[in-house]
């Protein structure tokens, strides 16, 4: 897994991520860039990072190409595009039980949005969970998420924060979360999260 987040104020939005990527054989391929920008949207992805011949960022770029969407609508567009591809991916490429990923998107819009795609093993289909917030969304390993939430309790001045202040907050939160991320769930000798931290912002 890994740790990703989006945080925003009235003046800016920032996405941030660690850079761990682990191969199917358990080898760390860090640093790997998990943040992206498509038009006016910025985002970050965690979980399954490549399937059906493309990485997740390329799939997302295709899903959003030419569209000018708010984060909530972009999350739904990403799900509508990715779910059929995930369901059709060959089992010898990705076992169905491992077809789980998170995407968080932000823009100048006052709401951040996310979508989590995960397998329903009984029905053999991909299902989705959505979330929205006006300040913070995070995804990744449970220990790392808890640390992000602890680190980014709403500051009293958050409405005044510009992009550089938000970037500093996000960087510190990811760096502290990396330390507490624990081992990779499939490869316990490899950490689930590692640096360096990558960031993108809009303001």
Image: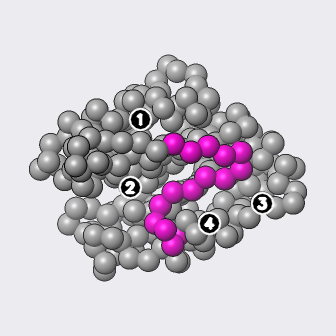
The stretch drawn in magenta includes residue 132: yes
Q: Nearer the viewer, mark 2 or mark 1?
A: 1
Labels 2 and 1: the sequence-earlier one: 2
Label 3's element?
loop
> What residue do we see at 44% from left, 77% from top?
182
Measure how far apart labels 4 and 2 are at the Cα level: 17 Å
Question: In whole angstroms, how far apart are the C-alphas of marks 3 and 2?
Answer: 26 Å
**Residue indicated by mark 1:** 79
Query: Which of 2 and 125 lies nearest the eye of the viewer?
Result: 125
- Seen from the viewer's position, the closer of residues 89 and 170 is 89
Q: CA distance from mark 3 to mark 1?
A: 29 Å
The quadrant holding residue 154 is bottom right
- Which label number is shown at residue 174? none
84 in relation to 28, above or below: above
Which label belongs to residue 148? 4
User: Mark 3 or mark 2, which has the lower sequence index?
Assistant: 2
Residue 9 locus on image (x, y percent): 78, 47
Confirm or deny contact between disc 4 and disc 3 (CB under 8 A). no
Q: Quadrant of the N terminus?
A: bottom left
Residue 77, image x, y percentages? 46, 29
Quadrant including the C terminus: top right
Residue 47, which numbered label?
Answer: 2
Q: CA distance from mark 1 to mark 4?
A: 25 Å
Q: Earlier in the sequence, mark 4 or mark 3?
A: 4
Residue 123 is inside the magenta segment: no
Residue in view at x 68 percent, y 39 percent: 111
Q: Which residue is mark 3?
A: 154
**Secondary structure under the numbered disc 2 in the rendered image:** strand
Badge 1 marks a residue whose secondary structure is: helix
Asked if disc 4 and disc 2 are in contact, CB closer than 8 Å, the reply is no
Question: Left of 158 or right of it: where is 98?
Answer: left
């Amino acid at each position: 897994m890994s740790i990703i987040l989006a945080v925003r104020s009235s003046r800016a939005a920032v996405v941030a991520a660690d850079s761990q990527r682990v191969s199917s054989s358990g080898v760390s391929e860090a640093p790997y860039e998990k943040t992206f920008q498509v038009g006016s949207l910025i985002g970050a992805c965690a979980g399954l990072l490549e399937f059906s011949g493309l990485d997740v960022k390329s799939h997302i770029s295709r899903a959003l190409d030419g569209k000018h969407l708010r984060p909530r609508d972009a999350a739904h567009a990403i799900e509508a595009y990715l779910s059929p591809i995930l369901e059709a991916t060959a089992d010898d490429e990705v076992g169905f039980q491992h077809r789980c990923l998170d995407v968080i998107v932000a823009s100048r819009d006052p709401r951040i949005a996310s979508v989590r795609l995960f397998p329903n093993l009984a029905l053999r289909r991909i299902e989705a969970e959505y979330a929205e917030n006006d300040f913070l969304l995070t995804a990744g390993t449970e220990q790392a998420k808890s640390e992000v939430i602890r680190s980014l309790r709403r500051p009293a001045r958050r409405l005044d924060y510009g992009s550089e202040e938000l970037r500093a907050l996000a960087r510190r939160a990811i760096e502290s979360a990396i330390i507490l991320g624990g081992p990779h769930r499939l490869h316990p000798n490899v950490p689930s999260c590692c640096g360096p931290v990558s960031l993108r912002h809009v303001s």
